[in-house]
Image (cartoon, grey):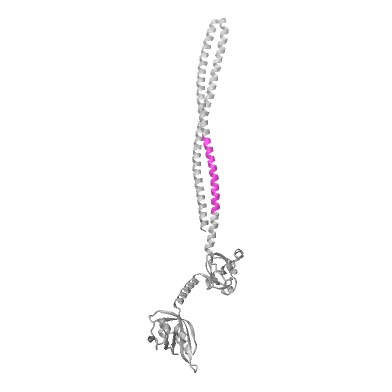
Amino acid sequence: MAAIESSIPKIEFTPDGIIADVNDHFLSAVGYQADEVLGAHHRIFCDADYIESRAYRDFWKQLRSGQSHKGTFPRVTANGDRIWLDATYFPILDDQGRVSRIMKIASDVTEEHELLMDQQAVFDAINRSMAVIEFLPDGTILQANDNFLNVIGYRAQDVEGRHHRIFCFDAFYEQNPDFWERLGNGEFMTGQFERRRADGSKVWLEASYNPVLDEAGNTLKVVKFASDITAYMEQSLRTQEAASVASSTASETADIARRAGESLNQSLETSTQIDDGVARVRSVVEQLNQKTESIEEMVTTISGVAEQTKMLALNAAVEAARAGEHGRGFGVVAEEVRKLAFNSREASRDISGVINAIVELSSDVENQIDRVGTVATEGRSQMNDAVAIVDDIRSGAQRVLDAVEGINRGQ
């Protein structure tokens, strides 16, 4: 008893709850002086609501009947602060076996209790908002909250005592055979996990597996906190599929645009060659026109000479007729000269006709060449526009590829 007095808060009551004795350790805990509590009732340490409650009346009734009480009790100090006492109330019996005193020994656990309450409040908040399940270190299920059971589609009695593998597809343990060994060694794990519902369908969980260790560092249990991210993962998978299709399409588009660009560039080169050819043909036609003009001048000269020859032959025939028999031979020559002049004139006319036809054809050729040149110029302009468009398509396809790569990196 002396050891208790010297080291532990102690207080004694009559069976009715009147304070009969108290040591300094207890007074220090509640902030009272001895003369303030001796003779007062136990209720000075209690909340008003508790004092008026049936539970408080039953508490003292049970103590008077010889029943002890042990627990962590909220109490009120002299200045009105709430403290928590880890205490035991045990009745002391007299020689007749009747309760003569109630002794209480206590320790102030306010700091520890409030810390525990804070932790419990955090856990309760997590328990309300997240899916929580607890395992033994070997993966045996201890318990799961309603959120987890609703996500996974099981009832509590269907999972408690069974192994974690009921939530997994075969591939998970094939790829992670040491999963529970690592957790049992205290390794923390987090990630996105594909799991199996009770009906066999897939569910995705964003989860952390948290080993709970004892003072020696041994794993007592593993607590898993999880959120259902199935909708997000399905959308992510659809986005990846769409990105893959977009990437493939953009790649094909870029390749088509590249080939189209090469073809258009070849067409531009061909168009340039056509322009060069048209220019050369135009030059040849111009030279032909010049030669034709020269021939026309020569034909004109020949026609003039033929006309003069005809006149000379006519004069010679007249003179031969005058000369009579002596001019017969000269007359024959004059006649041949006249015929030659006539034939020369006719040939000149034919040549002029051919030259005129050549001139007309040359004019038509020039017109056609001009039209070809115009079409070629327009075609080249259009091809230049097409090349620019193809370049834009290729650039756009590359931007799509870059965007898809960015999406994939973000995933």
Q: Residue at x 49, y 40 (%)?
A: 381
- Residue 144: which quarter of the image? bottom right
Total labels: the figure holds: 0
Q: Residue at x 53, y 35 (%)?
A: 274
- Choose between 216 and 308: the one closer to the eye: 216
Most extreme residue toward the bottom is: 96
Chief secondary structure of the magenta span? helix
Against 241, residue 23 (above or below) is: below
Q: Magenta includes 259?
A: yes
Residue 323: x and y in percent read 54, 5
Residue 11 in sight from this viewpoint: yes
Q: Magenta includes 185?
A: no
Q: Is residue 54 left or right of residue 335?
A: left
Against 117, residue 281 (above or below) is: above
Against 185, residue 400 (above or below) is: above
- Choose between 193 and 14: the one closer to the eye: 14
- Choose between 131 and 379: the one closer to the eye: 131
Q: Residue at x 47, y 73 (%)?
A: 119
Residue 401: x and y in percent read 52, 52
Residue 8 in sight from this viewpoint: no
Give the magenta range: 246-275
Residue 61: x and y in percent read 47, 89
- Choose between 76 and 174: the one closer to the eye: 76
Against 380, residue 208 (above or below) is: below
Residue 409: x and y in percent read 52, 56
